[in-house]
Image (cartoon, rainbow, N blue to C red):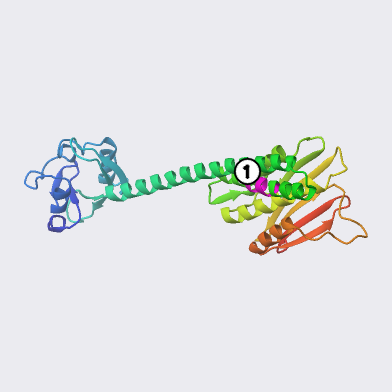
């Protein structure tokens, strides 16, 4: 009794009929109970009946019978005219050895401020995610508008060189717009690449391929997941390589064109490739000077600690971005 009554923690000492034998001053102060009247009252009768919780009573009966112990049981203490408290309760049966009296110590901890802080944090995170999605959606729409303006301008200019520059700028803006569209629906810390690349390829195909019979685009990806930063870089690489293949690999092909985006990984090593069955690399001629797209891919690959290789797929071309040596 002396230990319970002098405790700084909110404690109750109960008998085998869930009647209060003693209470700490902290318990009385925390839950606004009169220390002079709390003894010899059933727990369910304390206050205005807010402690009359059937599940708590059942758990205490099981503890008294020795069938269980209450360890970190959470419940709401609902009091009329007062704020609801979120409590963590623990109860343990005491062993006296020299008496048949049953005594159970019930400890209550008010975690209302903690749960409120957690809720506020969760609400802020959700609000941030909604705002970020809205921002990304607006950015994607703006990029689509810019791309449309560039294409209309390319159709009106007389200079072939200017037209090519505008078309190239259009492709760059479209690549960012399509990637931004995928990011708008990908807010997880862990990004599943199979879904991510498949959605990205569908978006590119819908925007850049006017005739599905002439060119098809397919993603063959394993079950790898990665963080959002890596997925962004990989998405930019895929978009750049696919658009480059659409623009240059099938100039004289009217049907049967195919582009495959593949990815597989093994213990930290991975291989990302984009393969087409188009006209392939020039034979017996000097390779064309690397353009802006090549520079973008190489810069992104460097960020990922990967290397880039262009291979004759016979027919077509295969571009590999590799980190380490994954199994084929």
The quarter of the picture where the N terminus appears is: bottom left
Q: Is residue 235 left or right of residue 327?
A: left
Q: In this view, does 295 lie above or below 48?
A: below
- Displayed quadrant of residue 155: top right
The x and y percentages for residue 318 are 80, 54
Question: Which residue is disc 1 drawn over?
Answer: 146
Q: Does the magenta stretch include residue 29?
A: no
The x and y percentages for residue 51 are 21, 39
- Displayed quadrant of residue 237: bottom right
The x and y percentages for residue 113 are 28, 49
- Looking at the picture, tell me which residue is in the foreground, 72 or 290: 290
Q: Is residue 324 left or right of residue 68?
A: right
| Figure disc tally | 1
- Displayed quadrant of residue 215: top right
Q: In this view, does 26 lie to the left or right of 274?
A: left
Residue that extends furthest to the left in the rendered view of this protein = 36
Magenta stretch, overall SS:
helix
- Looking at the picture, tell me which residue is in the foreground, 101 or 202: 202
Span of residues in magenta: 171-177
Please indicate, yes or no, whether residue 32 appears anywhere in the rendered image. Answer: yes
Q: Is residue 175 magenta?
A: yes
- Looking at the picture, tell me which residue is in the foreground, 327 or 320: 320
Give the residue drawn at x 88%, y 43%. 252
Give the residue drawn at x 81%, y 48%. 248
The x and y percentages for residue 257 are 83, 42
Please indicate, yes or no, whether residue 89 appears anywhere in the rendered image. Answer: no
* Crowdedness near tag 1: few (<14), some (14–19) or many (≥20) residues, C-alpha within 10 Å: some
């Amino acid at each position: 009794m002396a230990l319970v009554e002098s405790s700084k923690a909110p404690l109750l000492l109960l008998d085998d009929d869930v009647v209060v034998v003693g209470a700490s001053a902290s318990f009385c102060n925390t839950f606004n109970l009169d220390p002079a009247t709390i003894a010899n009252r059933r727990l369910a009768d304390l206050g205005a009946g807010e402690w009359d919780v059937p599940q708590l009573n059942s758990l205490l009966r099981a503890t008294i019978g020795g069938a269980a112990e209450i360890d970190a049981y959470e419940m709401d203490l609902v009091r009329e005219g007062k704020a609801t408290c979120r409590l963590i309760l623990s109860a343990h049966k005491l062993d006296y050895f020299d008496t048949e009296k049953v005594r159970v110590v019930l400890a209550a901890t008010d975690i209302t401020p903690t749960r409120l802080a957690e809720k506020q944090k969760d609400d802020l995170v959700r609000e941030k995610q909604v705002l970020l999605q809205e921002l990304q959606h607006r950015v994607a729409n703006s990029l689509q508008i810019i791309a449309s303006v560039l294409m209309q301008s390319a159709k009106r200019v007389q200079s072939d060189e200017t037209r090519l520059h505008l078309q190239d700028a259009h492709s760059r803006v479209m690549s960012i717009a399509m990637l931004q569209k995928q990011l708008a629906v990908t807010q997880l810390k862990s990004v599943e690449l199979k879904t991510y690349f498949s959605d990205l390829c569908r978006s590119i195909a819908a925007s850049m391929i006017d005739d599905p019979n002439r060119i098809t685009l397919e993603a063959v990806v394993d079950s790898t997941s990665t963080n959002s930063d890596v997925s962004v870089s990989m998405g930019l690489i895929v978009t750049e390589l696919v658009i480059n293949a659409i623009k240059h690999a099938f100039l004289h092909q009217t049907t049967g064109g195919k582009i495959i985006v593949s990815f597989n990984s093994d213990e930290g090593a991975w291989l990302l490739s984009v393969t087409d069955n188009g006209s392939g690399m020039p034979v017996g001629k000097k390779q064309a000077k690397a353009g802006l797209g090549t520079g973008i891919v190489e810069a992104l690959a460097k960020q990922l600690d990967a290397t880039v290789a262009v291979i004759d797929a016979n027919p077509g071309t295969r571009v590999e971005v590799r980190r380490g040596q994954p199994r084929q």
